Image (spheres, grey):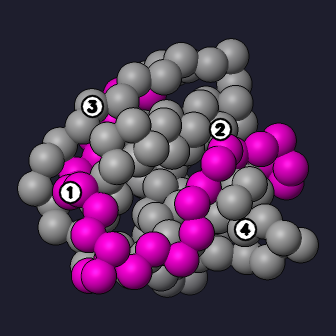
Amino acid sequence: MVKVQPIKPRAELFAHGADIGVRGLGPSRATAFEQAGLALMMAVTEPSRVAPQTAVEIQCEAPNDAILLMDWLNALIYEMSVRQFLFGRFAVVINGERLVGQAWGEPVNRSRHTPAVEPKGATLTLLKVETRRDGTWVAQCVVDV
């Protein structure tokens, strides 16, 4: 009997020219989306510096997982821009083609958050949502900064 290690969620960035790749990994599609949101924040600031003071609800609907990911990330970017907010925690529920998520954060404090970049939009470049052989879900794309 082979012992399978549990899949641990994680967020990571990857280099892509002048832009930034964001990647979320996890044991479920929803967790991978949450981690992709966290990776987006990692491009801007250290997410642990962001206090989860206010919850913002985000809803998206798309014909496939990849477009749903792009819509989720673009909704986060929109909320960041309109509210002048940063987020440090996420919860996502995906039911078919519909995503309902929450992002917790606070207004930008330039001296504490020291934002590095301003994301402009998630793109189709390297966009994918898939499962690996080990069962890990991957949700990634390149974000224009």
Residue 31's quadrant in the figure?
A: bottom left
Quarter of the image for residue 73 reads: top right
Instruction: Using residue 45 as the reference point, say whether residue 131 is left or right of it.
Output: right
Separation of residues labelled 4 and 2 (CA atoms): 14 Å
- Asked if residue 142 is positioned above or below residue 55 in the image, the reply reads below
Please, what is the three-letter code of the amino acid marked with disc 3?
Glu
Three-letter code for the amino acid on which mark 4 is drawn: Ile
Q: Earlier in the sequence, mark 4 or mark 2?
A: 4
Question: Could you tell me how far apart the alpha carbons at marks 1 and 3 are, in whole angstroms?
Answer: 14 Å
Q: Is residue 128 left or right of residue 23?
A: right
Give the residue pinned by disc 3.
57
Q: Position of residue 145 (x, y in %)?
A: 69, 60
Q: Can residue 138 be seen at all in this image of the molecule?
A: no
- Numbered range of the magenta stretch: 99-128
Residue 90: x and y, percent? Answer: 31, 52
> Does residue 105 appear to the left or right of 140 in the view shown?
left
**Count of labels in the image:** 4
- Disc marking residue 70: 2
Query: Quick one: quadrant of the N terminus?
Result: bottom right
* Label 3 or label 4, whichever comes before in sequence order: 4
Please give the name of the residue rendered at 39% of the width and 80% of the height, measured from the top-left corner. Answer: 114
- Judge depth for marks 2 and 1 and give the one in front: 1
State yes or no: discs 3 and 4 in contact (Cβ < 8 Å): no
For discs 1 and 4, the disc positioned in front in the rendered view: 1
Q: Looking at the picture, tell me which residue is in the foreground, 67 or 144.
A: 144
Is 64 rendered above or below residue 44?
above
Question: Who's the residue at 41% across and 47% down the image?
Answer: 80
Residue underneath mark 1 = 106
